[in-house]
């Protein structure tokens, strides 16, 4: 009788030890944030529709957090990669900046890939945006006169914070397929 009592108490504890760590890495609503970010970009600038319609693929980063003080700064974020409108994987972005900077900010970013070859370069891992590339700040009508540079177009939308530096050059990306 005592053995059954102990087993009955031990079973829920074992379940928690196994199931909770497995579930901790999965959030079913996390991917919804990518869709919400896309809608926010489209609402702010409807002319972005041509990029969504014509790009072979795109990566959506709902939140990138960036900070810097004096001569050193960095950024980090997680996102989702779409190929021809279908979710194909996750991505992370990191950036280290050296030079005068001060403050912190969060922003959303979308990277459009013109062709399959451009997206494949990104998916191969260790992708890096060139230091000369700048993100276009999304405001109404900004995408009208914007085009691809080396097969990519990058758009950013500030969310909060203030920072005296705002480049995307030097961002490094990883890709994890689903």
Image: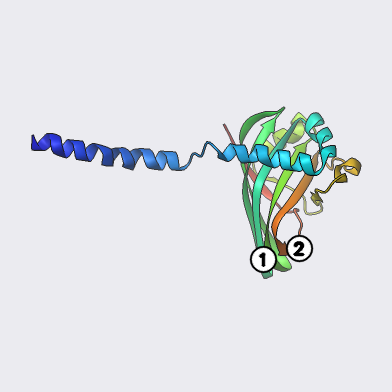
Q: Position of residue 70 (x, y in %)?
A: 69, 72
- The residue depicted at 76 percent of the width and 66 percent of the height is 164
- The residue depicted at 24 percent of the width and 36 percent of the height is 11
Residue 73 occupies quadrant: bottom right
Kind of element beneath mark 1: strand
Picture mark count: 2
Q: Position of residue 88 (x, y in %)?
A: 63, 31
State if disc 1 and disc 2 touch (CB < 8 Å): yes
- Report the quarter where the N terminus lies: top left
Q: Which mark is residue 7?
A: none
Q: Which residue is mark 2?
A: 165
Tell me the colour scheme of the image: rainbow
Q: Which mark is residue 68?
A: 1
Q: Nearer the viewer, residue 45 or 102?
A: 45
Question: Height in image: 145 above or below 115?
Answer: below
Residue 124 appearing in the image: no
Residue 80 occupies quadrant: top right
**Would residue 52 be found to the left or right of residue 89 on screen?**
right
**Would residue 92 be found to the left or right of residue 140 on screen?**
left
Kind of element beneath mark 2: loop
Dot 1 crowding, Cα within 10 Å, few <14, some 14–19, many 20+: many
Q: Position of residue 33 (x, y in %)?
A: 62, 41
Q: Nearer the viewer, residue 19 or 121?
A: 19
Q: Nearer the viewer, residue 151 or 52?
A: 52
Q: Position of residue 120 (x, y in %)?
A: 70, 33
- The residue depicted at 75 percent of the width and 49 percent of the height is 156
Residue 18 appearing in the image: yes
């Amino acid at each position: 009788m005592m053995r059954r009592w102990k087993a009955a108490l031990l079973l829920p504890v074992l379940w928690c030890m196994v199931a909770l760590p497995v579930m901790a890495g999965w959030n079913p609503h996390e991917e919804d944030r990518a869709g919400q970010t896309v809608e926010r970009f489209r609402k702010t600038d409807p002319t972005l529709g041509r990029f969504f319609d014509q790009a072979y693929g795109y990566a959506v980063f709902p939140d990138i957090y960036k900070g810097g003080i004096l001569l050193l700064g960095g950024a980090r974020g997680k996102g989702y990669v779409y190929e021809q409108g279908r979710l194909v994987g996750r991505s992370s972005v990191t950036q280290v900046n050296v030079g005068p900077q001060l403050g912190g900010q969060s922003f959303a970013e979308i990277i459009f890939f013109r062709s399959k070859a451009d997206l494949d370069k990104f998916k191969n891992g260790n992708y890096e945006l060139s230091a000369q590339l700048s993100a276009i700040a999304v405001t109404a009508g900004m995408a009208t006169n914007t085009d691809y540079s080396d097969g990519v177009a990058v758009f950013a939308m500030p969310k909060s914070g203030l920072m005296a530096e705002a480049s995307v050059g030097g961002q490094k990306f990883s890709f994890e397929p689903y």
